[in-house]
Image: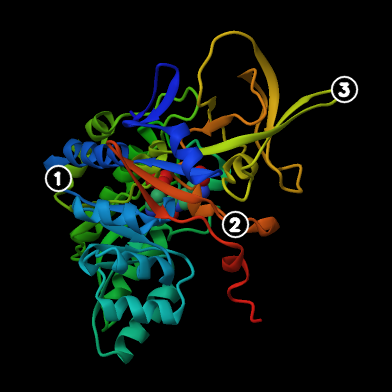
Amino acid sequence: MHEFRFKNNRLYCENVAVEAVARRFGTPLYVYSYRTFVVHFRKLKAAFRAVRPLICYSVKANSNLAILRVLVREGAGLDIVSGGELYRALKAGCPPQRIVYASVGKTDAEIEEAIRRGILFFNVESLPELENINRIAGRLRKKTDVALRINPDVEPKTHRYITTGKLTNKFGIDFRTAKKILMLGQALTHVRIRGIHIHIGSQITIGEPFVEAIKKVVAFIAAMKARGIAVEYLNIGGGLGIIYKNEKPQTAVEFARKVLPVLRKSGLKIIMEPGRFIIGSAAVLVTKVLYIKKTPLKKFVIVDAGMNDLIRPSLYDAHHRIVPLAARSGQSEKADVVGPICESGDFFAKARRLPKVREGEYLAVMSAGAYGFSMASNYNSRRRPAEILVRGSSVTVIRRRESFEDLIRNEGR
Ligand code: LLP
């Protein structure tokens, strides 16, 4: 479900013609639909109401403050992975007790700041990290809560770069080690191990890997309880897939139907960390066609957005639908849609069938809300794009386009 629709052959975001926004603010431009991500958040919340989970939106998917504020106001917590994301989370007004903090490489400074602020949990990824948190909390004369991130060794059937729950991945702790840590944890004086966390990967379109992973950890938690070591929380991570091409991802309700029975039976307090499911389909990247270049072998549609604005096709061979803002029937042609960056990997689509497009017209790269702007860079000294939030008929700049001055801001005179 999303709120980008054609009316009279023009692409609209809610009640606003996307082309009007593109003309007003220039391109490349991220355009977000408020209603789309709020509805996704609410759908997930409703589907899981039987266990009343804390839904910690994963900030890395899209960390714009305006978006975080809206979700926090809706009752979301936040899943963070760095001091920078903690800073954003607090700026967005997120109560610290709704913040969970994962990452295999938390620095001392990051740990200290998170302890001082009183976040809900660190999701701990190794024994050395746990000992470090214990040491820092001790120095601050505090006791801090943690969850152990377990690596359940399941195959999530997604891109290898975004698979995180296999033992060959750097994430989480295997069951044997986790058992040892839980037993040892009793002796650590400045941490309380209050939960178990998993996150098996991203863009997962089927329920089975989640069910398999959850069953494994629930059994583990029960076995530990039998030995007198109990935890209260289970964080099932994020990873729910969305439609980019012709995927048939599970809806929130279908997902809930599969995992709720296990979750309810466990009696644990549930946390989840969706990113893409909430924000993925809530934005388009609007770009203008600069040139049509024909070579003896190919047709290139050269646009003004590049891999620095949206890296997913270059990095993961990810498919994003591309549509002209002005729909039309008639001839289509195969073309490569490429950016202006000096790399052959700078493309949005290869050999894609598109309506015949003209120089100067606008295209929308669809489903660009998650890992779009948040992975954007200044490569080739390109200014990162502006971000626009549409709500009904209202249009707000939630990040202005960077200036040339922004590019050199930290480089002295
Ligand atoms: N929790 C943890 C611990 C994570 O590492 C992630 C994402 C999430 C939650 C949110 O996952 P989601 O619900 O969005 O799938 N850049 C890649 C995706 C990387 C995902 C990293 N971790 C992409 O563009 O596909």
Q: Which mark is residue 51?
A: 1
Q: Tell me the element at label 2.
A: loop
Please give the label number shown on residue 182.
Answer: none
Mark 2 or 1: the one toward you: 2
Marks 3/1: CA–CA distance: 60 Å
* Corner quadrant of residue 406: bottom right
Q: Estimate the x, y position of residue 78 in percent, counting from the top left.
A: 30, 58
Quadrant in the picture for residue 138: bottom left
Whichever of callouts 3 and 1 sits on the residue coming sooner in the sequence is 1
For the residues labelled 3 and 1, say whether their Cβ atoms are less than 8 Å apart.
no
- Name the spot of residue 240 as percent of width and height, x first: 37, 39
What is the crowding at mark 2: few (fewer than 14 residues within 10 Å), some, or many (at least 20)? many
Out of 16 and 106, give the one closest to the viewer: 16
Q: Quadrant of the N terminus?
A: top left
Residue 314 against residue 187 in the figure, above or below = above
Q: Quadrant of the C terminus?
A: bottom right
Determine whether the beta carbon of the residue marked 2 sits less than 8 angstroms from the nearest atom of ligand 1.
Answer: no
Q: Nearer the viewer, residue 103 or 300?
A: 300
Q: Is residue 86 above or below residue 354?
A: below
Label 3 belongs to which residue?
296
Label 2 sits on what residue type? Arg
SS category of the residue bearing label 1: helix
Q: Residue furthest top?
A: 330
Q: Residue at x 20, y 42 (%)?
A: 45
Give the residue type that dot 3 points to: Pro
